[in-house]
Amino acid sequence: MRWENLTDGPARDRTRDAALFGTDVVTTRTFDTPEFSGITFHEIRARSIINRVPGASRMPFEWTVNPYRGCTHACVYCFARKTHSYLDLDTGIGFDTQIVVKVNAPELLRRQLASRRWHGDHIAMGTNVDCYQRAEGRYRLMPGIISALTDHTNPFSILTKGTLILRDLDLLCRAAAVTDIGISVSVGFTDHELWRTVEPGTPAPERRLDVVRTLSDHGIGCGVLMAPVIPFLGDHPDQLRATVRAIAASGATSVTPLVLHLRPGAREWFMAWLGQHHPYLVGRYERLYAEGAYAPKWYQRRITRQVHELAEEFGIGPSRARAARRIPVPEPEPEPVAGPTQLTLL
């Protein structure tokens, strides 16, 4: 496997060894517990933890932190599958079961945040693989990461499907008191049959919406990324209505739809799954995604319009780009005054 850019050890001569590292810089572990059955963890010491997003990316942020590679959520559509091929790891089952853990992520992040070269820009997490996947329950990297960001009052956001984020609720409240934070939960649909087949390692959709509700109850506004909307399987008007209704009931501050996209690595795995579970849809998908990784603009616009109309009906609106939520600091109640008072909208 290729471990360059992930380890503290010096890279070997590329011409001689194609940047391959020996097993001495990687600790490989398996755990004899039901929740980690069949999963292998590769513990490495990263050289850098704050990553710049490529300029050509569609992402609305510039910097990310990813303490893991690979994801036990095993979502068949996950666009991050391709990243496993960079390490000569399989993008199918290997992505679901071969998890790279950057065990020094919290200490390394703290060091990089203290560097004079770092200017306190927003850092996004959970945008490649989920930082609250099951592995986080054992390795507990996120408390140290959140604490480092809080101590440096560095703004950040987290996107997750994991209910484990509630373990760090107190840390998130502390962070929100001193810097801008944004929390989003991913819920593309509430259909249980679809969930069990395409997101087999994730908490149920209603459990994720419980996360939204709990965060809101503690003063942390939480948006929902309604992703992915899966063509012909999760895009029926009744399905969209049920999902947006549930999102609104959870107290979400926003709902942002995102249609399924199939990048190389994910495309092959998803199409194989589709051929096994819904073979009658293979031809329709080949036509819909004939031009590349993204569904046609007309289809994306149709889904976005439907979701936004439903969101308006149920009292929630689309999120603003780069919007971060912050717990408001309570202001002292004003002294009563005599005479009429003009009301203002803040």
Image (cartoon, grey):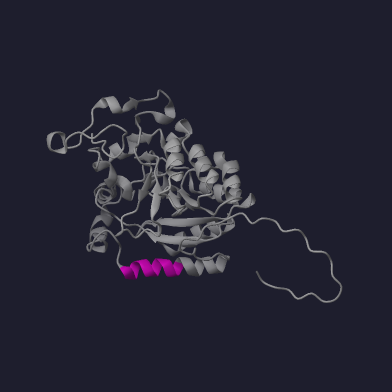
Q: Is residue 17 left or right of residue 266?
A: left
Residue most extreme to the right: 338
Most common SS among magenta residues? helix
Taking the image as drawn, is residue 134 in sight?
no
Whether residue 300 appears in magenta in the rendering, the answer is yes
In the figure, residue 139 lies in which quadrant?
A: top left
Residue in the image at 42% along x and 43% along y? 112
Residue in the image at 37% along x and 58% along y? 59
Q: Nearer the viewer, residue 201 or 110?
A: 110
- The image position of residue 332, as x and y in percent, is 75, 58
Whether residue 311 appears in magenta in the rendering, the answer is no
Residue in the image at 33% along x and 35% along y? 97
Residue in the image at 43% along x and 27% along y? 34
Taking the image as drawn, is residue 173 in sight?
yes
Tell me the quadrant of the picture where the N terminus can be found: top left
Q: Is residue 69 left or right of residue 157?
A: left
- The image position of residue 108, as x and y in percent, is 42, 38
Q: Nearer the viewer, residue 214 or 120?
A: 120
Residue most extreme to the left: 15
- The image position of residue 238, as x and y in percent, is 46, 62
Numbered label tally: 0
Tell me the quadrant of the picture where the C terminus can be found: bottom right
Q: Which residues are magenta?
A: 297-306
Residue most extreme to the front: 116
- The image position of residue 318, as x and y in percent, is 49, 65
Q: Nearer the viewer, residue 7 or 99?
A: 7
